[in-house]
Image: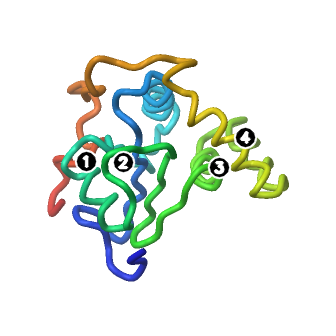
Amino acid sequence: MNMAALPPGVRAEDRVVLFDGVCRLCAGWVRFLLRHDRERRFLLCSVQSAEGQAILQHFGLPTDRFDSMLLVEGPHAHYRSDAFLRIVRDLPGAWRLLAGLRVIPRPLRDWCYERIALNRYRLFGRNAQCLLPMPEHAGRFLPNDREGG
């Protein structure tokens, strides 16, 4: 994996959450982040988008299947439960308490995460198309309208 250079379209200060745009569970997670990330700490990006595909390629990940949330922080990528825990750590209020789950050993956390991820379509279903950003979410998704971005 290329960890030194920034992924395409990502700036050093960016924190980008890559998600499966047709997964209903993932779409719910995105709606949750849009509602609770009031400080706009995270950008969102569907893995099905050109930007998402470029980021996956940058990190040497498959572009035809996706079974883990990915958090990109500048040139670094975090997967599975590590990505989830890093995100909730920076949400307001009681949500950050979930970051305490970090005391559980990573192999056990990731095993639980993978059980849900591998069965997400069967458990939650699929959307016919990717989640589309609403006008009020301007600047929250890659590509976005930020200056110089």
Q: Crowding near pointer 2: few (<14 within 10 Å), some, many (20+)?
A: many
- Which residue corresponds to the image point at 75% horizontal and 57% vertical from the top-left? 106
- Which residue corresponds to the image point at 31% horizontal and 59% vertical from the top-left? 55
Q: Secondary structure under badge 2?
A: strand
For marks 2 and 1, give the CA distance.
7 Å
Of the residues shown, which amino acid type is indicated by label 4? Cys
Looking at the image, tell me whether mark 3 or mark 4 is earlier in sequence order. 3
Check contact, mark 1 vs mark 3: CB within 8 A: no
Looking at the image, tell me whether mark 2 or mark 4 is earlier in sequence order. 2
What residue is pinned by disc 4? 112
* Horizontal and vertical percent position of residue 81: 65, 49
Of the residues shown, which amino acid type is indicated by label 2? Leu
Q: Secondary structure under badge 3?
A: helix
Looking at the image, tell me whether mark 2 or mark 3 is earlier in sequence order. 2
What residue is pinned by disc 2? 43
Check contact, mark 2 vs mark 1: CB within 8 A: yes
Query: How many dots with numbers?
Result: 4
What residue is pinned by disc 1? 142
Front position in the image: 107 or 72: 107
Front position in the image: 91 or 65: 65
- Which residue corresponds to the image point at 48% horizontal and 35% vertical from the top-left? 33
Q: Quadrant of the N terminus?
A: bottom left
